Image: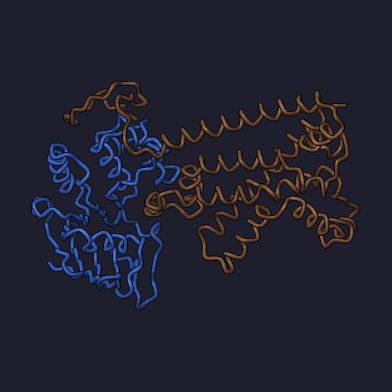
Amino acid sequence: MNLLSPILLSLRVAALATLVTLLVGLGLARLLGLRRVPLRRLWEAVIMLPLVFPPTLTGYLLLVILGKRGPIGALLASLGLTVVFTWIAAVIASFVVSLPLMFQNCKAALLSVDPQYENAARTLGLSEGRVFRRITLPLAAPGILAGTALSFARAMGEFGATLMVAGNIPGRTQTMPLALYAAVEGGRSVEANILLAVTVGLCFALVAVVSIYERRGYRVRDSGRPEGELPRNGRPRTGRPWNGRIRNGGGRP
Amino acid sequence: MILVNFEKELPRFTLKAAIMLEKPMTAILWGESGAGKTTVLDCIAGLAEPDRGEVLLEGVTVFSSSRGVNLPPRERGVGFVFQSYALFPHLTAEENVALAMPRERRGSAAGYLERLRIAHLRKTKPPLLSGGERQRLALARALAIHPRLLLLDEPFSALDWRTREETHREFLAMRDELAMSVILVTHDRAEADLLGHRIYELRDGEVLE
């Protein structure tokens, strides 16, 4: 059995799903978290539903919607397109189940930015769009990144919804979790162990990335100067108050 | 000319602000903490909305309840030095200043840093600056937009006494050099007497000259 195929398929599905989730989740968090939108709580509840639904139920709902007789499936069929039981269906399943995680993290990250920074930027003449791009987004980046890593992990591990809507077709829609299940069920323990090792390795890498960025985020938010730390220009700082003289010739423009 | 005349209902009292600067000068808004000093500044800058009244800055009506005018902060041309300075921690000192400038003027950001004598720190990010340096940077950033009016919210309160004395002296020199309309908020009466041409007291929600 080819083990590379499910691993590569899972990476491809998870990467594409995460990209879409990031764009949609961040956009929704911005829209619903910061503006007065009618029925805001209802929209939020709908986004959060896949988190509490059994994944097989989410998968079944997707199958109903995307199937040939479903509202979207019929439309696609009239264009000669089929989504169910293709790897695109796996991407859609992963997107739907990881969107709540991304949305929640993005919303919390955007709200965690001190509004004073945004207000300062407004008084400096920045438009709302530039305030978001130049101030809010960079300051919220660590939280958004954590949400992205979580969503990627959720997409990599997606099983129930994927099985329902994409099936378990080796070489075409059999992702890593499905291949693992098939290997265990078929008594192929060597294959199962290899897949286990690969998964553990990927998870460690993800956790490492998140923790590195969370540390960076802490450094950015910390308003106090760490003891004994050198400034960026590399000169040690003394505790003396400024003595009225320019220290290094002023660095003229 | 600067004319501020408005009322705003606050949870505990009604804030009535009346400030007029007929020529460029430094007005001090003095009062105890919780008197609503920062709210007055927020209303002038457009970060809060008064219930009634008007705010005129150098001939421009930026707020008028009777005429339905309420310009957003970015169109008011008010330089604001926040109490916590609100320097963008992810940008260098120079980027903090340049952010406010149109593309073609960005090169002059370093000039403002030099004027406040922090040019040597232009590549440093605010979390690595001392209290005094942060205050200078916040002032440089506020001046870079060529404001009609400069608002300073307790700009010296975060500094140790020695740095404060020094920056008081510098402020006085700069005040006369800039010849700009300034409203400075403080709770320190001695500071108010030292720095202002005119002192307004904020007591029980009312501004008294």
Q: Residue at x 25, y 72 (%)?
A: B13
Q: Which residue is at the front of the view, B102 or B35?
A: B35
Q: Is residue A147 above or below residue A243?
A: below
- Please tell me the colour of chain A: brown
Q: Which residue is at the front of the view, B162 or B10?
A: B10
Q: Is residue B174 above or below residue A57?
A: above
Report the label total: 0
Q: x and y percent of residue B138 in the render?
A: 30, 44
Horizontal side of A30 relative to B97 (left or right) equals right
Q: Which residue is at the front of the view, A78 or A82?
A: A82
Q: Which chain is blue?
A: B
Quadrant showing the C terminus of chain B: bottom left
Q: x and y percent of residue B103 in the render?
A: 45, 43
Q: x and y percent of residue A170 in the render?
A: 88, 35
Q: x and y percent of residue A177 in the render?
A: 76, 37
Horizontal side of A94 relative to B119 (left or right) equals right
Question: Which image quadrant is residue A40 in?
Answer: bottom right
Q: Residue at x 89, y 61 (%)?
A: A69
Q: Residue at x 70, y 47 (%)?
A: A95
Q: Which color mode does the image show? A: by chain
Q: Residue at x 76, y 55 (%)?
A: A57
Q: Is residue A205 above or below residue B96?
A: above
Quadrant showing the N terminus of chain B: bottom left
Residue located farthest toward the top when viewing the structure as drawn:
A235
Q: Which residue is at the front of the view, A107 or B196?
A: A107
Horizontal side of B189 relative to B39 (left or right) equals left
